[in-house]
Amino acid sequence: MNKAEKERLARVGAKFNVKKYIAEEIEAIRQQVGDKKVLLAMSGGVDSSVCAVLLHKAIGKQLTCVFVDHGCMRLNEAKEVKNIFKGKFGINLICVSAEKRFLEKVAGVTEPEQKRKIIGGEFVRVFEEEAKKLGKIEFLGQGTIYPDIAESGVGGHKAVKAHHNVGGLPKDMGFEGLVEPVKYLYKDEVRAVGKALGIPTNMVMRQPFPGPGLAVRCLGELTKEKLDILRKADFIFREEMAKAKLDKKAQQFFAVMTNVKSVGVRNGARTFGYVIAIRAVSTQQFVQAGVVQLPFKFVVDVAGKIATQVKGVNRVVWDITPKPPATIEWE
Ligand code: XMP
């Protein structure tokens, strides 16, 4: 048993008990934080959401969350985060609409790694600016989960992509310490805690969404026009997957803006519109992934819906490539 495993056993026990975990963690947070303050970067993803609600239960208004909308979020995502966490839970949440700022930074950039790095770097700057405005905050909350720490330090494999997520904040931001209330939990345990805390099912069951968001699904230069088209196409696909109850069959499913334009016809007139790709994969650990064999009629219907309902799109293709050789995301 390595150090991380021993720590998990000590904290979680041999059998995970949600209620007990929540009660103990709330107590542990109160012990650690006392009357000091905590700042948390929320992404709208499962881990940081559960972390936020747990911290809020423990220390209420001593917690401030910051959600940065970098303009590459899915349709209605920023609104949903605000409604749920500020509205339903009453969490002290600051939503920063920074779409314009991010898009200006990446204007003209087409190289995928460069796009990722610019977005990651800008995210840190926006977060730091917000933190400064708030004055002294002693602790940084983080939605680190057990696989993050269990896998770190294993090393040896070459990073395929420069991953960025909201946990990736610099170490020198001047905080006294970290508060990581879900650090020893596996993903399914984090979801169970979230459910027990009353976070809506669609939020706790969310598929993983990369830190740079739609930026890694919008090929070539990032523009508001392309991102808006992608958001609409992606929303239709995800909604249809849920309606057809196919969403349980895939760990990740989404639309991609290919940046290719092709000729089509609408109402008897020629169109020149974008090609959207759809992708659904099943995977355990995201290191390998298989293509989900969606019913063919379903795929054809979705393609028809996207191509007719989303202005600017006249063709839809289905990505049927496993990982490897393809990665899950297109960039
Ligand atoms: P790939 O595309 O490398 O993705 O097969 C594997 C898994 O990682 C997610 N992913 C990211 N997650 N920040 C994240 O937090 C990122 O920059 C990032 N890039 C990819 C991807 O969605 C998949 O689940």
Image (cartoon, rainbow, N blue to C red):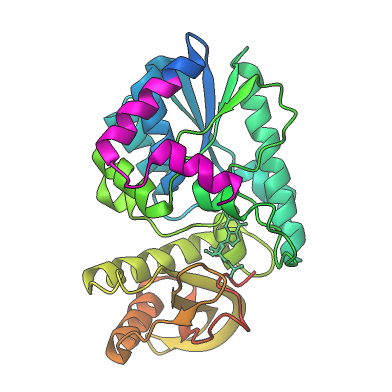
Quarter occupied by residue 110 = bottom right
From the image, which quarter does the C terminus lie in?
bottom right
Query: Taking 300 as reference, is 287 left or right?
Result: right
Magenta span includes 245: no
Predominant SS of the magenta segment: helix
194 vs 25, nearest the viewer: 25
Percent x, y for residue 149? 59, 47
Query: Can residue 116 be seen?
Result: yes
Quarter occupied by residue 308 = bottom left
What's the magenta region?
1-29
Magenta span includes 24: yes
230 vs 23, nearest the viewer: 23
Q: Residue at x 46, y 58 (%)?
A: 208
169 vs 25, nearest the viewer: 25
Count every numbered label the image shows and give the total.
0
Percent x, y for residue 131? 62, 23
